Image (spheres, rainbow, N blue to C red):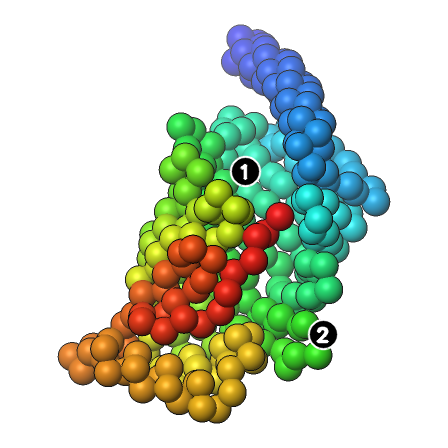
Amino acid sequence: MFYPLAGMILLSLIWCGYWFIAFSGAKELIQAKRLEFAGQGMELICARESWGGFPFRFEFQCETATLHFIHTEIQTTKILAIAQAYNPLHVIVLVDGPTSIDRTTVTHDRALISVKINTRLDLAADTTELTVIRPDNPPITVSSAELVGHTSGQTLEISRLKISQGAVDFVATGTVSLDAQHRLAGKLSSQTNDLDGLMKSIEPFLALNEQDSTAIKNLVTLTGSDPKTNTTKADFVAREGALYWGLIKLVDLTPLY
């Protein structure tokens, strides 16, 4: 009876020692990285921050979180980052909305972001009931959005991007990066089950008039309609400062910073 109890106490003491040492190391590493990124123009500011999670997790909570990135400011209600003590390289980040990006406001349910750190970053994110509100523009609503991908050097390889609004689904795979002028570059192979519904959703975002919208829809239907699957397929390509959908130029792209 004594030996099993003593063994349990010993294991508990060893685990507690491991947790405090690992927790202290993780906290110091994150603080050092925040200082490093701040020197590069990316600074995270919290109205109130706290650390915890004993005995099985590491937790970092940032309330009224503001991320300054070059000339862009992103603010959200709360960020909670959680990692299991036995697997600290897999971090779950929970983001409570609304979130603002400069003058654009995004309302959403709690967003979940999974980050696995190894020789690359494996990413997965999803949220629901998302509405994008921009000044002088009608709101854009999305029922759900999810992203799965990983980094490869300076490129984000997307294995699955799905955006749904009611019965309208938009699904894409591909790569995204920044060019030398810090503009979006890359290619997404996409398909939708309802081209008319998709066009109604993106018209406000791209400031398309009825004539432009009809021309785009007709050309995309002509080149990408797939009767077998009842879907319409086309590539989104960002190159040389412009975004194309199939053969059609949609919009000019400005540097992100």
Occupied quadrant, residue 69 = top right
Task: Identify which residue, 27 or 70, lies in the foreground.
Answer: 70
Q: Is residue 250 above or below residue 217?
A: above
Occupied quadrant, residue 245 = bottom left
Q: Is residue 32 above or below residue 205?
A: above
User: Horizontal placement of 246 versus 199: left or right?
Assistant: left
What residue is rendered at 37% in x and 86% in y?
215
Occupied quadrant, residue 228 = bottom left
Quadrant occupied by the N terminus: top right
Report x, y in % for residue 42.
Answer: 68, 38
Residue that badge 1 annotates: 91
Task: Identify which residue, 237 or 80, lies in the foreground.
Answer: 237
Q: Amino acid at mark 1?
A: Val
- Say whether residue 12 is visible: no
User: Horizontal placement of 224 versus 19: left or right?
Assistant: left
Residue that badge 2 annotates: 135
Q: Dot 1 surroundings within 10 Å: few (below 14), some, or many (20 or more)? A: some
Q: Is residue 194 above or below residue 60?
A: below
What secondary structure is found at the residue carrying circle 1? strand
Q: Dot 2 surroundings within 10 Å: few (below 14), some, or many (20 or more)? A: few
Q: Amino acid at mark 2?
A: Pro
Q: CA distance from mark 1 to mark 2?
A: 34 Å
Report x, y in % for residue 8.
Answer: 56, 16
What residue is rendered at 45% in x and 68% in y?
163
What residue is rendered at 37% in x and 64% in y?
236
Q: Return the disc, 1 or 2, that comes first in the chain's sequence.
A: 1
